Image (cartoon, rainbow, N blue to C red):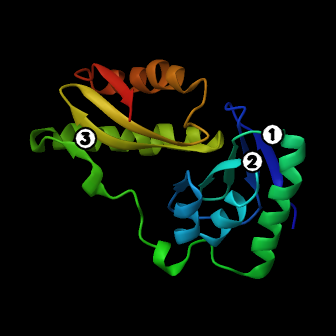
Amino acid sequence: MFIQTEATPNPATLKFIPGQPVLPGDTRDFRNGDEARAQSPLAERLVDIEGVAGVFLGADFIAVTKADGEWQHLKPAILGAVLEHYMSDTPVLAARGQQSTDSAEQEFFDDADQETVATIKELLDTRVRPAVAQDGGDIMFQGYKEGIVYLHMRGACAGCPSSTATLQHGIENLLRHFIPEIQEVRPV
């Protein structure tokens, strides 16, 4: 098995591509060890490595965020843990972790804005999320209120120095182009 690595715009995050599906059709972001241990054997292996602060599982990649240390020291341990996981035939998610933590129940918007929210979600799914996934992250709709769109930044996007520019100059401009009543895009 050959695992590729790619840099992301966030210097604290590297993208690992195992050449096979990781979590098709879904994404998960683990920012603490307890959450990873409860839901994903793969994420658990990775967060147990000293210096790893977070793990994001995408459709075909794993984005790992470091707390401290140098990539030259962390990368071999991460590659080893990913290889060990895939060689063990252990599932990526534990049975108790199969339920998505990103449910629509957490979203907020007024019922009168359903059509606007549907358009926002379609634009995010077709134009934003595929591009952001290339950089090892994800952006999820969280809410819409009084012309303000609230988005949840995940993976390499969380804590990325360029995330503010991505939100304000990229996503906000795109959404305003198609939905003029949008005034602002904010991270949650």
In the rendered structure, which amino acid carries the disc numbered 2?
Answer: Gly
Q: Which residue is mark 3?
A: 117
Left or right of residue 120: residue 13: right
Is residue 156 in view from this perspective?
yes
Q: Image height check: is 147 above or below 28?
A: above
Q: Image height check: is 17 above or below 126?
A: below
Using a 10 Å C-alpha cutoff, classify the residue at mark 2 as few (fewer than 14 neighbours), some (14 to 19) or many (20 or more): some
In the rendered structure, which amino acid carries the disc numbered 1?
Answer: Gly
Which mark identifies residue 69?
1
Left or right of residue 30: residue 64: right
Question: In whole angstroms, how far apart are the C-alphas of marks 2 and 1?
Answer: 6 Å
> Which numbered disc flags the more N-terminal residue, 1 or 3?
1
Left or right of residue 8: residue 107: left
> Which numbered disc flags the more N-terminal residue, 2 or 3?
2
In the rendered structure, which amino acid carries the disc numbered 3?
Answer: Val
For image coordinates 50% across by 80% down, the residue present is: 95
Residue 30 spot, x, y in % from top left: 55, 55
For image coordinates 77% across by 64% down, the residue present is: 82
Left or right of residue 45: residue 150: left
Residue 138 spot, x, y in % from top left: 52, 44
Which mark identifies residue 61?
none
For image coordinates 47% across by 77% down, the residue present is: 96
Is residue 21 in view from this perspective?
no
- Label 2 close to label 1 by CB (< 8 Å): yes
Which mark identifies residue 51?
2
Residue 147 spot, x, y in % from top left: 22, 25
